[in-house]
Amino acid sequence: MYMRILSWGRQSCLEEVNGGSQKATFRAGHIYHVLNRGTQRQQLFFSDDDYRRFEVLIEDTLARIPLPVLTFELMPNHWHFVVKPDDQDQLSSFFGYLAGTHGKRFRVAHGTTGQGHVYQDRFKSFPVQSDGHFLIVCRYVERNALRAGLVGQAEAWPWGALWRRQHALDSWLMSDWPMALTFCDPLVLS
């Protein structure tokens, strides 16, 4: 068994290599940007009810595997989360359960059981490098629907954390941010 570092640009993740099997190792207390997308960019959510059912699944998954969620955004064919695991297995357990359960339910709901993977991969995760990087990643995640042209303002997309914070909803879903933000912070204003 040995450790190697996987790199994506400036971002890296430790991977434990044990014989032929590989298991990503996540550090407790570190912040990660996690995402997944439908196979071949297939749509995952077709209606408001699909989004609501996925949010209920997030709640159920949090009850099983409590994982601090700092922000998130659900898009028609993918999703993003920014999380801070308390132990090294929490991130893999949470997103494995979330995507696996959603994939099974998706296939049953659409009558496509046995027709392959719903998601293109287990999930992708990138460690957040600094406080400034944290703000940039959160802004990127929360502006996803705006960049995709789904809404005119980021806070108008109801399937993400920004809308929920604006409407003081779902304290069960989101954890406190690891830093205090002030409205004079240039990254918040830009």
Image (spheres, rainbow, N blue to C red):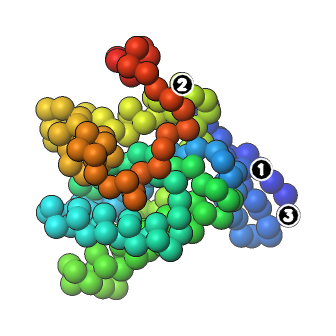
The residue that label 2 is drawn on is 132
User: From the viewer's perspective, is 56 left or right of 1?
Assistant: left
User: In what element is the residue under mark 1?
Assistant: strand
Q: How far apart are the two marked residues, 3 and 2, measured between alpha carbons? A: 35 Å
Tell me if 188 is positioned left or right of 5 in this view.
left
Q: Marks 3 and 1: in contact by CB < 8 Å?
A: no
Where does label 1 land, which residue?
4
| Circle 2 Cα neighbour tier, 10 Å, few/some/many (<14 / 14–19 / ≥20) | few
**What's the residue type where badge 1 is placed?**
Arg
Task: Say which amino acid is labelled 2.
Answer: Gly
Tell which tag, 1 or 2, sits nearer the viewer: 2
Q: Give the image location of residue 101, x and y in percent.
A: 40, 76
Q: Is residue 60 above or below residue 91?
A: below
Question: As shown in the figure, which amino acid type bears the numbered disc 3?
Answer: Met
Is the residue under label 2 in contact with that under label 1 (CB below 8 Å)?
A: no
Residue of label 3: 1
Location of the N terminus (image quadrant) = bottom right
